[in-house]
Image: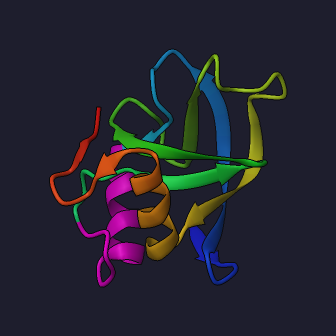
Amino acid sequence: MFEQFSSGYYLGRLYVEPYDGDVPAIQREDHTHVNERLYAEEELVRLDIPLVMKLDQEHFPVVGNENIPSGTLALPEDFAGSDLPDDKHVLLAKPDRATELLRYAGYDLDNGAALA
């Protein structure tokens, strides 16, 4: 699903579509597979911590959701652009970059909870 791209990112191609959820999501099994395959020996090893993806110029945390089809990135409707649905290149932050971005966004990675 994702391959080496740069020192900070993996590159993948996903079908991106709007949905009525609150947070960006991919299929739960895809989320677990990507987390285990790419992050298993790095800092992010908990499967409940969001992945960090970048589409166009925006980073966002991505959770697993069993209602999303495999190979699909679902974006909340207010977050999705008018050019969706479409097949798009998506960047996945590598563990060091993802950790930095999640902490910046307020996630407490030691406890797995977002800070208020």
Horizontal side, residue 76 vs residue 28: left or right: right
Query: Residue 44 magenta-drawn?
Result: yes
Task: State left or right for residue 70 relative to residue 3.
Answer: left
By secondary structure, the bulk of the magenta-drawn segment is best described as helix
Colouring mode (rainbow / by chain / secondary structure / one colour): rainbow
Q: Residue 16: x, y in percent?
A: 66, 38
Which quadrant of the structure image shows residue 67? top left
Asked if residue 73 is positioned above or below residue 10 in the image, the reply reads above
State the residue lying farthest toward the left: 111
In the image, the segment drawn in magenta is: 28-45
Q: Is residue 23 left or right of residue 17?
A: left
Residue at 84% x, 28% y: name it: 83
Is residue 4 placed above or below 57 in the rendered structure?
below
Q: Quadrant of the N terminus?
A: bottom right
Q: Quadrant of residue 37?
A: bottom left
Which residue lies at the image location 77% right of the left edge and 26% below the top edge?
Answer: 81
Say above or below: 79 vs 113: above
x 69%, y 78%: residue:
5
Q: Can you give x and y, in whole percent of width and height, for residue 104 in the image?
A: 46, 52
- Tell me residue 10's x, y (percent): 61, 72
Q: Position of residue 13 (x, y in %)?
A: 69, 57
